[in-house]
Image (tube, rainbow, N blue to C red):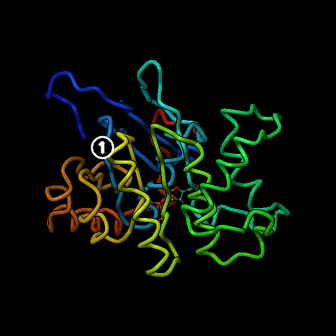
Amino acid sequence: MDDRGLGPVVNALTVRDLTVSYRGHPAVHHLNGALAFGSFTAVVGPNGAGKSSLLGALAGLLPYQGHIERPHPAPRVAYLPQAAALDRTFPVQVHEVVASGLWWRTGWWGGLRIAEHHHVRDALARVGLSGFERRWLGELSVGQVQRVLFARVLVQDAGLILLDEPFNAVDARTTTDLLDLLEPWRQEGRTLVAVLHDLNQVRAHFDQCLLLARECIAWGPTAEVLSPEHLERARHMARSWDESAPLCEGVRS
Ligand SMILES: Nc1ncnc2c1ncn2[C@@H]1O[C@H](COP(=O)(O)OP(=O)(O)OP(=O)(O)O)[C@@H](O)[C@H]1O
């Protein structure tokens, strides 16, 4: 939650005046706030609100202006991209995708030892894909691919987990199964940020919420953030976006 004026808070991550832009057009404007350790934060907002751009910057994948501050030692970060960003034609097997989440144990070019193979197998079992190790990614359904990506997150054993639309285009049963994986993370004290569109899911599973419409509409306890006034303001902002507007002064791409 936003820590301005609230005194010392131990945060997994703090953003100060964060702006993410593409060719000078800001997708996220001057964002300030923080993620308390162990908090579950949903990022919501209309299409084009900058939610994926924010996660990309937090994951260290996109350039930004402003500051992203992490404690020392910083928690390891796991990032689950939007399914649409994944090339499912890439010839890779399920066990390789999951094992890529073990780089922090093996190094980028390290081979897997027995223990790592067991981690991969156990993670696949937890997401309901026992025996799928040698299947090609391109053979799997959208929901099964999402389970594979969750298995990769599980083996990453990260303190800060970033999920971009993790339940997009997956059926109700898969969503329920994957939502069940989140609750242990709460008990384990992991910090979670997820981009979501289903506000009922947000209310049920996330104590904190950031409502984004390129700028912050509200950031704090979910019940306060998802008020009719805030949601209407976000909708209103989205109607007024002009993709051909002049570049924001001082903003680099
Ligand atoms: N790679 C890119 N190059 C140029 N512009 C981009 C790029 N990615 C996103 N944008 C622009 O940044 C703005 C925010 O996009 P972003 O994908 O972050 O929004 P979002 O809230 O995640 O949207 P959605 O809910 O549709 O996934 C949009 O105007 C989009 O066109």
Farthest residue to the top: give it. 72
| Picture quadrant where residue 59 is located | top right
Picture quarter with the N terminus? top left
Name the spot of residue 152 as percent of width and height, x first.
62, 52
According to the picture, the residue beneath numbered tag 1 turns out to be 39
Direction right: furthest residue: 91
205 and 23: which is toward the camera: 205
Query: Which one is nearer the viewer's eye here, 162 or 210?
Result: 162
Q: Residue at x 53, y 38 (%)?
A: 77
Left or right of 29? Residue 233 is left
Q: Residue at x 64, y 47 (%)?
A: 119
Residue drawn at (45%, 37%), measured in percent from left and top? Answer: 159
Q: Is residue 249 left or right of residue 56?
A: left
Residue type at the position of mark 1? Ser
Which quadrant of the structure image shows residue 17? top left
The quarter holding residue 230 reads bottom left
